[in-house]
Image (cartoon, rainbow, N blue to C red):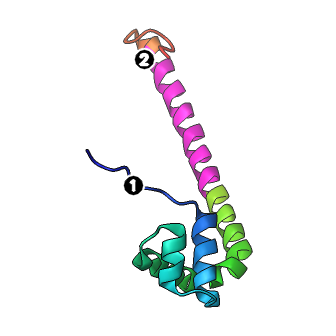
Amino acid sequence: MSKKRRQYSPAFKAKVAIACIRGNKTTAELAAQHEIHPTQINTWKRELLENASTVFANGKLADKAQSEAKAENDKLYRQIDKLKVERDFLAECSAQLGLLPESPW
């Protein structure tokens, strides 16, 4: 029977990685304490060190991403409005020609 993989929260990963960076305990000691493979701790430590700069730039990145998302939403809403106008026009023309019942949706 297969064993289900454990999943760790980001807070737990950060706590273990920071403890490893502090150096109060060795990686092996932390691995034994938290029942994790030492390689996993080293991976979390490396990821924390590589992505530490995003902690301080997160506000700027979030604002930029939010403004880009808003611009994309506005573009999509304009496209939806255009398509609705086209659909209504075609439905009206079809009804006048007797091809389809008016406003089938």
Would you say 32 lies left or right of 98 here?
right
In the image, 18 versus 10, the foreground residue is 18
Q: Residue 49's mark? A: none
Q: Main secondary structure of the magenta part?
A: helix
Give the residue type that dot 1 points to: Arg
User: At x 48% / y 57%, what residue is drawn?
Assistant: 7
Which callout, 1 or 2, points at the residue further toward the start of the chain? 1
Cβ atoms at labels 1 and 2 below 8 Å apart: no
Give the spatial CA distance, label 1 vs label 2: 58 Å
* Mark 2 element type: helix
**Is residue 87 magenta-colored?**
yes
User: At x 45% / y 56%, what residue is drawn?
Assistant: 6
Give the residue type that dot 2 points to: Ser
x, y percentage for residue 81?
60, 38
In the image, 13 versus 25, the foreground residue is 25
**Is residue 74 magenta-colored?**
yes
User: At x 50% / y 84%, what residue is drawn?
Assistant: 27
- Mark 2 — residue? 94
* Mark 1 element type: loop
Of badges 1 and 2, the one in the foreground is: 1
The answer to which image quadrant residue 64 occupies is bottom right
10 Å crowding of disc 2: few (<14), some (14-19), many (20+): some
x, y percentage for residue 101?
44, 9
x, y percentage for residue 76?
57, 48
Q: In the image, is residue 51 above or below residue 73? A: below
What range of the chain is rendered magenta?
72-94
Q: In the image, is residue 94 above or below residue 18? A: above
Q: Quadrant of the N terminus?
A: top left
10 Å crowding of disc 1: few (<14), some (14-19), many (20+): few
- Mark 1 — residue? 5
x, y percentage for residue 103?
51, 15
